Protein backbone atom coordinates (compact mmCIF):
# COMPACT_ATOMS: atom_id res chain seq x y z
CA UNK A 1 0.00 0.00 0.00
CA UNK A 2 0.98 3.64 -0.34
CA UNK A 3 2.07 5.04 3.04
CA UNK A 4 2.76 8.61 4.11
CA UNK A 5 4.67 9.28 7.34
CA UNK A 6 4.78 12.56 9.27
CA UNK A 7 7.56 12.86 11.85
CA UNK A 8 7.47 15.32 14.75
CA UNK A 9 9.88 16.14 17.55
CA UNK A 10 13.57 15.63 18.15
CA UNK A 11 16.41 14.04 16.20
CA UNK A 12 15.99 10.82 18.18
CA UNK A 13 12.39 10.67 16.99
CA UNK A 14 13.58 11.29 13.44
CA UNK A 15 15.76 8.17 13.66
CA UNK A 16 12.76 6.16 14.89
CA UNK A 17 10.83 7.40 11.87
CA UNK A 18 13.67 6.45 9.52
CA UNK A 19 13.72 2.95 11.04
CA UNK A 20 9.95 2.74 10.59
CA UNK A 21 10.20 3.78 6.94
CA UNK A 22 12.73 1.01 6.34
CA UNK A 23 10.48 -1.66 7.89
CA UNK A 24 7.53 -0.50 5.79
CA UNK A 25 9.51 -0.35 2.58
CA UNK A 26 11.03 -3.77 3.25
CA UNK A 27 7.50 -5.15 3.65
CA UNK A 28 6.57 -4.00 0.15
CA UNK A 29 4.81 -0.73 0.90
CA UNK A 30 5.38 2.38 -1.19
CA UNK A 31 6.40 5.58 0.59
CA UNK A 32 4.67 8.73 -0.67
CA UNK A 33 5.09 12.40 0.22
CA UNK A 34 1.68 13.61 -0.94
CA UNK A 35 -0.87 12.81 1.82
CA UNK A 36 -3.62 12.89 -0.80
CA UNK A 37 -2.09 9.77 -2.34
CA UNK A 38 -1.52 7.87 0.93
CA UNK A 39 -3.72 4.87 1.67
CA UNK A 40 -2.19 4.73 5.15
CA UNK A 41 -1.03 7.79 7.12
CA UNK A 42 1.31 7.53 10.12
CA UNK A 43 2.06 10.37 12.55
CA UNK A 44 5.11 9.77 14.75
CA UNK A 45 4.59 12.07 17.74
CA UNK A 46 6.48 13.92 20.45
CA UNK A 47 5.20 14.61 23.98
CA UNK A 48 8.17 16.25 25.72
CA UNK A 49 6.44 19.49 26.71
CA UNK A 50 3.00 21.03 26.36
CA UNK A 51 3.77 22.77 23.06
CA UNK A 52 4.98 19.48 21.57
CA UNK A 53 1.81 17.71 22.70
CA UNK A 54 -0.32 20.48 21.18
CA UNK A 55 1.60 20.25 17.90
CA UNK A 56 1.10 16.47 17.86
CA UNK A 57 -2.66 16.70 18.47
CA UNK A 58 -3.05 19.49 15.90
CA UNK A 59 -1.11 17.46 13.34
CA UNK A 60 -3.22 14.35 13.99
CA UNK A 61 -6.43 16.31 13.41
CA UNK A 62 -4.98 18.00 10.33
CA UNK A 63 -4.06 14.71 8.66
CA UNK A 64 -7.21 12.88 9.78
CA UNK A 65 -9.01 15.09 7.24
CA UNK A 66 -7.41 12.98 4.51
CA UNK A 67 -9.62 10.10 5.61
CA UNK A 68 -12.46 12.25 4.26
CA UNK A 69 -10.79 14.05 1.36
CA UNK A 70 -7.99 11.73 0.22
CA UNK A 71 -7.36 8.04 -0.32
CA UNK A 72 -6.50 7.32 3.31
CA UNK A 73 -8.14 4.13 4.61
CA UNK A 74 -6.13 3.65 7.81
CA UNK A 75 -4.62 6.14 10.25
CA UNK A 76 -1.81 5.25 12.70
CA UNK A 77 -0.34 7.22 15.61
CA UNK A 78 3.06 6.23 17.03
CA UNK A 79 5.75 7.63 19.33
CA UNK A 80 5.90 9.47 22.63
CA UNK A 81 2.40 10.96 22.75
CA UNK A 82 0.94 7.58 21.89
CA UNK A 83 3.06 5.81 24.50
CA UNK A 84 2.27 8.34 27.22
CA UNK A 85 -1.49 8.73 26.72
CA UNK A 86 -2.42 5.63 24.75
CA UNK A 87 -5.60 4.54 26.52
CA UNK A 88 -7.02 8.08 26.64
CA UNK A 89 -6.19 8.70 22.97
CA UNK A 90 -7.68 5.36 21.96
CA UNK A 91 -10.95 6.28 23.64
CA UNK A 92 -11.08 9.84 22.35
CA UNK A 93 -9.64 9.63 18.82
CA UNK A 94 -11.94 6.99 17.39
CA UNK A 95 -10.92 7.87 13.81
CA UNK A 96 -7.40 6.54 14.53
CA UNK A 97 -7.11 2.84 13.67
CA UNK A 98 -3.87 1.92 15.43
CA UNK A 99 -1.76 3.32 18.26
CA UNK A 100 1.71 1.98 19.05
CA UNK A 101 4.39 3.11 21.51
CA UNK A 102 8.05 4.03 21.27
CA UNK A 103 9.77 0.71 20.62
CA UNK A 104 7.26 -1.26 18.56
CA UNK A 105 8.18 0.20 15.17
CA UNK A 106 9.58 -3.12 13.94
CA UNK A 107 6.16 -4.68 14.58
CA UNK A 108 4.37 -2.14 12.41
CA UNK A 109 4.26 -4.21 9.16
CA UNK A 110 2.60 -7.14 10.95
CA UNK A 111 0.20 -4.82 12.76
CA UNK A 112 -0.78 -3.24 9.46
CA UNK A 113 -1.44 -6.67 7.94
CA UNK A 114 -3.67 -7.49 10.91
CA UNK A 115 -5.46 -4.16 10.61
CA UNK A 116 -6.19 -4.69 6.91
CA UNK A 117 -7.34 -8.27 7.54
CA UNK A 118 -9.62 -7.59 10.53
CA UNK A 119 -10.46 -3.91 10.00
CA UNK A 120 -10.48 -3.59 13.81
CA UNK A 121 -9.00 -0.69 15.80
CA UNK A 122 -6.32 -1.62 18.30
CA UNK A 123 -3.34 -0.35 20.29
CA UNK A 124 -0.03 -1.81 21.40
CA UNK A 125 1.75 -0.20 24.33
CA UNK A 126 5.27 -1.38 25.09
CA UNK A 127 7.31 -1.74 28.26
CA UNK A 128 9.29 1.52 28.36
CA UNK A 129 12.49 -0.47 28.89
CA UNK A 130 12.01 -2.62 25.78
CA UNK A 131 14.89 -2.01 23.41
CA UNK A 132 15.04 -2.70 19.70
CA UNK A 133 17.86 -0.78 18.07
CA UNK A 134 17.95 -1.10 14.30
CA UNK A 135 20.41 -0.14 11.60
CA UNK A 136 17.73 -0.26 8.93
CA UNK A 137 17.15 3.28 7.71
CA UNK A 138 15.49 5.33 5.01
CA UNK A 139 17.28 8.65 5.42
CA UNK A 140 15.13 11.75 5.74
CA UNK A 141 18.16 14.03 5.96
CA UNK A 142 20.23 15.19 2.99
CA UNK A 143 22.75 12.48 2.12
CA UNK A 144 25.75 14.41 3.40
CA UNK A 145 24.78 14.03 7.07
CA UNK A 146 22.94 11.51 9.23
CA UNK A 147 21.99 11.05 12.87
CA UNK A 148 22.94 7.89 14.76
CA UNK A 149 21.26 6.99 18.03
CA UNK A 150 23.92 5.62 20.39
CA UNK A 151 21.65 5.13 23.41
CA UNK A 152 17.99 5.26 24.39
CA UNK A 153 16.29 6.47 27.57
CA UNK A 154 17.53 8.48 30.52
CA UNK A 155 18.56 7.80 34.12
CA UNK A 156 18.57 11.43 35.23
CA UNK A 157 15.74 12.32 37.55
CA UNK A 158 15.25 15.95 36.58
CA UNK A 159 12.06 16.98 38.33
CA UNK A 160 10.53 18.71 35.28
CA UNK A 161 11.12 15.95 32.73
CA UNK A 162 8.79 13.14 31.63
CA UNK A 163 11.28 11.43 29.30
CA UNK A 164 12.34 8.65 31.73
CA UNK A 165 8.67 7.70 32.14
CA UNK A 166 8.21 7.62 28.35
CA UNK A 167 11.54 6.25 27.10
CA UNK A 168 12.72 4.23 30.10
CA UNK A 169 16.17 3.74 31.56
CA UNK A 170 19.39 4.67 29.79
CA UNK A 171 20.50 1.85 27.49
CA UNK A 172 23.61 2.06 25.31
CA UNK A 173 24.06 0.31 21.98
CA UNK A 174 27.20 -1.81 21.59
CA UNK A 175 30.12 -0.08 19.86
CA UNK A 176 30.26 -2.62 17.04
CA UNK A 177 26.58 -2.01 16.19
CA UNK A 178 27.05 1.75 16.00
CA UNK A 179 30.24 1.49 13.95
CA UNK A 180 28.61 -0.98 11.55
CA UNK A 181 25.69 1.38 10.99
CA UNK A 182 28.04 4.32 10.49
CA UNK A 183 30.07 2.41 7.90
CA UNK A 184 26.91 1.45 6.06
CA UNK A 185 25.75 5.08 5.94
CA UNK A 186 29.11 6.30 4.69
CA UNK A 187 29.57 3.52 2.12
CA UNK A 188 26.01 3.63 0.75
CA UNK A 189 25.07 7.30 1.01
CA UNK A 190 28.39 9.12 1.07
CA UNK A 191 27.72 10.66 4.50
CA UNK A 192 30.25 13.38 5.41
CA UNK A 193 28.93 14.24 8.89
CA UNK A 194 27.84 11.74 11.54
CA UNK A 195 25.74 13.23 14.35
CA UNK A 196 25.68 11.07 17.48
CA UNK A 197 22.53 11.52 19.54
CA UNK A 198 21.22 10.30 22.88
CA UNK A 199 19.53 11.94 25.82
CA UNK A 200 23.08 12.14 27.23
CA UNK A 201 25.94 11.00 25.01
CA UNK A 202 28.49 11.82 27.73
CA UNK A 203 27.68 8.67 29.74
CA UNK A 204 27.66 6.37 26.74
CA UNK A 205 28.64 2.79 27.59
CA UNK A 206 28.47 3.07 31.36
CA UNK A 207 25.58 0.64 31.57
CA UNK A 208 26.98 -2.10 29.30
CA UNK A 209 30.75 -1.71 29.74
CA UNK A 210 30.91 -0.71 33.39
CA UNK A 211 32.54 2.60 32.47
CA UNK A 212 31.98 5.54 30.15
CA UNK A 213 33.19 4.44 26.73
CA UNK A 214 32.51 7.53 24.62
CA UNK A 215 36.13 8.16 23.65
CA UNK A 216 36.57 4.51 22.66
CA UNK A 217 33.48 4.80 20.45
CA UNK A 218 34.80 8.01 18.89
CA UNK A 219 38.17 6.39 18.14
CA UNK A 220 36.41 3.60 16.24
CA UNK A 221 34.25 6.06 14.31
CA UNK A 222 37.22 8.26 13.44
CA UNK A 223 38.68 5.35 11.46
CA UNK A 224 35.75 5.72 9.05
CA UNK A 225 36.05 8.04 6.07
CA UNK A 226 33.99 10.97 7.37
CA UNK A 227 34.79 14.66 7.64
CA UNK A 228 32.94 15.52 10.86
CA UNK A 229 31.56 13.75 13.93
CA UNK A 230 29.19 15.84 16.06
CA UNK A 231 27.97 15.05 19.60
CA UNK A 232 24.44 15.82 20.83
CA UNK A 233 24.00 16.13 23.88
CA UNK A 234 26.64 16.35 26.63
CA UNK A 235 25.49 16.87 30.21
CA UNK A 236 27.73 19.38 32.01
CA UNK A 237 28.49 17.18 35.04
CA UNK A 238 29.98 14.53 32.75
CA UNK A 239 32.23 16.72 30.61
CA UNK A 240 35.75 16.10 31.89
CA UNK A 241 39.18 17.21 30.76
CA UNK A 242 39.94 13.89 29.07
CA UNK A 243 36.94 14.30 26.77
CA UNK A 244 37.66 17.97 26.06
CA UNK A 245 41.29 17.19 25.25
CA UNK A 246 40.31 14.39 22.90
CA UNK A 247 37.71 16.52 21.11
CA UNK A 248 40.06 19.48 20.82
CA UNK A 249 42.92 17.43 19.41
CA UNK A 250 40.97 15.36 16.88
CA UNK A 251 40.30 17.06 13.54
CA UNK A 252 37.23 14.93 12.83
CA UNK A 253 35.39 15.84 16.03
CA UNK A 254 33.35 19.03 15.69
CA UNK A 255 34.44 21.66 18.20
CA UNK A 256 30.85 22.00 19.31
CA UNK A 257 29.47 21.42 22.80
CA UNK A 258 25.70 21.16 23.08
CA UNK A 259 25.16 20.82 26.82
CA UNK A 260 21.80 21.46 28.48
CA UNK A 261 22.33 23.68 31.54
CA UNK A 262 18.65 24.56 32.20
CA UNK A 263 19.59 27.22 34.80
CA UNK A 264 22.50 28.65 36.79
CA UNK A 265 20.79 29.66 40.04
CA UNK A 266 21.81 27.14 42.72
CA UNK A 267 18.36 27.24 44.29
CA UNK A 268 16.57 26.49 41.02
CA UNK A 269 19.11 23.86 39.96
CA UNK A 270 18.45 22.02 43.22
CA UNK A 271 14.68 22.21 42.72
CA UNK A 272 15.20 20.87 39.19
CA UNK A 273 17.12 17.88 40.50
CA UNK A 274 20.18 18.84 38.47
CA UNK A 275 23.56 17.48 39.55
CA UNK A 276 25.57 20.67 39.15
CA UNK A 277 25.67 24.06 40.83
CA UNK A 278 26.86 27.43 39.57
CA UNK A 279 30.36 26.93 40.98
CA UNK A 280 30.76 23.70 39.00
CA UNK A 281 29.33 25.33 35.87
CA UNK A 282 31.76 28.25 36.16
CA UNK A 283 34.64 25.82 36.70
CA UNK A 284 33.62 23.84 33.61
CA UNK A 285 33.53 26.98 31.47
CA UNK A 286 36.97 28.00 32.71
CA UNK A 287 38.25 24.61 31.64
CA UNK A 288 36.56 24.82 28.23
CA UNK A 289 38.00 28.29 27.63
CA UNK A 290 41.55 26.94 28.01
CA UNK A 291 41.16 25.13 24.71
CA UNK A 292 39.99 28.27 22.87
CA UNK A 293 38.25 26.26 20.15
CA UNK A 294 34.74 25.28 21.25
CA UNK A 295 31.39 26.76 20.31
CA UNK A 296 28.79 26.25 23.04
CA UNK A 297 25.06 25.73 22.66
CA UNK A 298 22.73 25.15 25.58
CA UNK A 299 19.12 25.30 26.72
CA UNK A 300 17.48 27.04 29.66
CA UNK A 301 14.08 26.92 31.33
CA UNK A 302 12.41 30.17 32.39
CA UNK A 303 9.62 30.34 34.92
CA UNK A 304 10.39 27.15 36.81
CA UNK A 305 8.25 26.85 39.99
CA UNK A 306 9.47 29.27 42.68
CA UNK A 307 11.85 31.07 40.30
CA UNK A 308 12.14 34.62 41.61
CA UNK A 309 13.25 37.73 39.76
CA UNK A 310 16.56 37.33 41.59
CA UNK A 311 16.96 33.78 40.26
CA UNK A 312 16.13 34.90 36.74
CA UNK A 313 18.57 37.82 36.98
CA UNK A 314 21.32 35.39 37.99
CA UNK A 315 20.64 33.65 34.66
CA UNK A 316 20.67 36.93 32.72
CA UNK A 317 23.95 37.99 34.37
CA UNK A 318 25.46 34.68 33.29
CA UNK A 319 24.31 35.30 29.70
CA UNK A 320 25.86 38.80 29.78
CA UNK A 321 29.26 37.18 30.32
CA UNK A 322 29.10 36.04 26.68
CA UNK A 323 30.16 32.47 27.36
CA UNK A 324 27.13 30.99 25.59
CA UNK A 325 27.27 31.22 21.79
CA UNK A 326 23.86 29.73 21.02
CA UNK A 327 20.97 29.06 23.38
CA UNK A 328 17.33 28.09 23.43
CA UNK A 329 15.02 29.11 26.25
CA UNK A 330 11.70 27.47 27.01
CA UNK A 331 8.90 28.52 29.30
CA UNK A 332 8.54 25.87 32.00
CA UNK A 333 5.95 23.26 31.04
CA UNK A 334 4.11 21.58 33.91
CA UNK A 335 4.16 17.90 32.97
CA UNK A 336 1.83 15.26 34.40
CA UNK A 337 3.50 12.85 36.80
CA UNK A 338 6.69 14.87 37.31
CA UNK A 339 7.93 16.02 40.71
CA UNK A 340 8.03 19.66 39.59
CA UNK A 341 4.33 19.56 38.78
CA UNK A 342 3.67 19.02 42.50
CA UNK A 343 5.85 21.93 43.66
CA UNK A 344 4.18 24.97 45.22
CA UNK A 345 4.88 28.33 43.65
CA UNK A 346 3.83 27.59 40.06
CA UNK A 347 4.38 30.73 37.98
CA UNK A 348 1.84 32.53 35.82
CA UNK A 349 2.16 31.89 32.07
CA UNK A 350 2.46 35.58 31.25
CA UNK A 351 5.48 35.90 33.58
CA UNK A 352 7.12 32.84 31.99
CA UNK A 353 6.66 34.22 28.49
CA UNK A 354 7.95 37.64 29.53
CA UNK A 355 11.11 36.05 30.92
CA UNK A 356 11.61 34.04 27.73
CA UNK A 357 11.39 37.25 25.69
CA UNK A 358 13.88 39.02 27.96
CA UNK A 359 16.22 36.06 27.68
CA UNK A 360 16.20 36.05 23.87
CA UNK A 361 16.59 39.81 23.63
CA UNK A 362 19.86 39.47 25.55
CA UNK A 363 21.10 36.16 24.14
CA UNK A 364 20.53 37.26 20.54
CA UNK A 365 22.91 40.17 21.18
CA UNK A 366 25.52 37.74 22.52
CA UNK A 367 25.08 35.43 19.53
CA UNK A 368 25.35 38.34 17.08
CA UNK A 369 28.56 39.46 18.79
CA UNK A 370 29.97 35.93 18.60
CA UNK A 371 29.16 35.60 14.90
CA UNK A 372 30.68 38.99 14.05
CA UNK A 373 34.01 37.60 15.26
CA UNK A 374 33.89 35.38 12.15
CA UNK A 375 34.05 38.37 9.78
CA UNK A 376 37.31 38.38 7.80
CA UNK A 377 38.07 34.75 8.67
CA UNK A 378 38.01 31.65 6.48
CA UNK A 379 35.97 28.57 7.44
CA UNK A 380 35.39 25.12 6.04
CA UNK A 381 31.72 25.10 5.00
CA UNK A 382 29.70 22.08 3.96
CA UNK A 383 27.50 23.15 1.04
CA UNK A 384 23.85 22.20 1.66
CA UNK A 385 21.64 23.97 -0.86
CA UNK A 386 20.57 27.10 -2.71
CA UNK A 387 18.46 29.94 -1.35
CA UNK A 388 16.69 31.13 -4.50
CA UNK A 389 15.35 34.28 -2.84
CA UNK A 390 18.85 35.36 -1.82
CA UNK A 391 20.42 33.90 -4.98
CA UNK A 392 23.14 32.38 -2.81
CA UNK A 393 24.43 28.96 -1.85
CA UNK A 394 24.26 28.05 1.82
CA UNK A 395 25.91 25.64 4.23
CA UNK A 396 27.32 25.23 7.74
CA UNK A 397 30.62 25.26 9.57
CA UNK A 398 31.59 22.60 12.10
CA UNK A 399 30.50 25.13 14.74
CA UNK A 400 26.87 25.01 13.59
CA UNK A 401 24.42 22.12 13.94
CA UNK A 402 21.69 21.52 11.34
CA UNK A 403 18.41 23.42 11.62
CA UNK A 404 19.18 25.30 14.84
CA UNK A 405 22.33 27.39 14.30
CA UNK A 406 23.81 29.90 11.90
CA UNK A 407 23.75 29.30 8.15
CA UNK A 408 26.61 30.49 5.96
CA UNK A 409 25.33 32.02 2.71
CA UNK A 410 27.97 32.35 0.01
CA UNK A 411 28.69 33.01 -3.63
CA UNK A 412 31.29 31.21 -5.70
CA UNK A 413 33.22 31.88 -8.90
CA UNK A 414 33.51 28.13 -9.52
CA UNK A 415 31.08 25.21 -9.52
CA UNK A 416 30.16 23.70 -6.17
CA UNK A 417 28.57 20.33 -5.31
CA UNK A 418 26.11 19.70 -2.49
CA UNK A 419 27.70 17.82 0.40
CA UNK A 420 31.24 18.95 -0.40
CA UNK A 421 33.45 21.19 1.75
CA UNK A 422 34.61 24.61 0.59
CA UNK A 423 36.71 27.39 2.04
CA UNK A 424 34.51 30.43 2.59
CA UNK A 425 35.68 33.85 3.72
CA UNK A 426 33.05 35.57 5.86
CA UNK A 427 32.30 39.17 4.82
CA UNK A 428 29.36 40.11 7.03
CA UNK A 429 26.76 38.96 9.53
CA UNK A 430 23.05 39.71 9.17
CA UNK A 431 20.09 38.41 11.19
CA UNK A 432 22.41 35.92 12.90
CA UNK A 433 23.54 34.32 9.66
CA UNK A 434 26.93 34.70 7.96
CA UNK A 435 27.61 35.79 4.39
CA UNK A 436 30.76 35.28 2.35
CA UNK A 437 32.44 33.92 -0.75
CA UNK A 438 34.40 30.79 -1.62
CA UNK A 439 38.12 31.13 -1.97
CA UNK A 440 40.78 28.86 -3.38
CA UNK A 441 43.31 28.40 -0.63
CA UNK A 442 46.88 27.56 -1.48
CA UNK A 443 48.24 24.38 0.13
Image (spheres, rainbow, N blue to C red):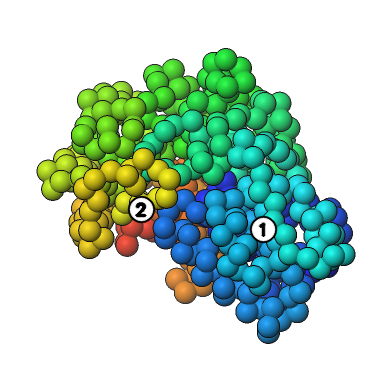
Mark pair 2, 1: CA separation: 25 Å
Could you tell me if residue 417 is visible in this image?
A: no
Label 1 element class? strand
Question: How many numbered marks have been drawn onto this rendered protein structure?
Answer: 2
Report the residue at 57% width, 15% height from top: 210
Task: State the residue position of label 1.
Answer: 99
- Of the image marks 2 and 1, the number of the one nearer the N terminus: 1
Q: Residue at x 51, y 34 (%)?
A: 154
Q: Considering depth in this image, is 441 or 321 the residue closer to the camera? A: 321
Residue topped by disc 2: 333
Instruction: Choose between 325 and 129: the one closer to the eye.
Output: 129
Mark 2 and mark 1 residues within 8 Å of each other at the beta carbon: no
Position above or below: 279 against 342:
above
Q: Quadrant of residue 417?
A: bottom right
Compared to residue 124, the image places residue 322 above or below, namely above
Label 2 sits on a secondary structure element that is: loop
Tell me residue 277's x, y (percent): 26, 28
In the rendered structure, the answer to whether residue 29 lies left or right of residue 330 reads right
Q: Residue at x 49, y 30 (%)?
A: 155
Amino acid sequence: MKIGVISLGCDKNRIDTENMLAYLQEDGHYLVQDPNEAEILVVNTCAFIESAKKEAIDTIFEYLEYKKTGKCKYFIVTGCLSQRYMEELYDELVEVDLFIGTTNYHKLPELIRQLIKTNKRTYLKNDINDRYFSSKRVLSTPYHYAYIKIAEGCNNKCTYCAIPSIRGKYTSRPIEEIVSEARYLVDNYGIKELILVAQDVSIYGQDIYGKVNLIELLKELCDINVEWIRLLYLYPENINDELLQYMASNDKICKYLDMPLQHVSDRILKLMGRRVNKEKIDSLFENIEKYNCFTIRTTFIAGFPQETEEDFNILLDFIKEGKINYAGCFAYSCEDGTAAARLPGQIDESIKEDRVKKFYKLQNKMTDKYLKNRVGKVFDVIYEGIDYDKQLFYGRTQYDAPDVDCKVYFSSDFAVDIGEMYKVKIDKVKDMDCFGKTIIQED
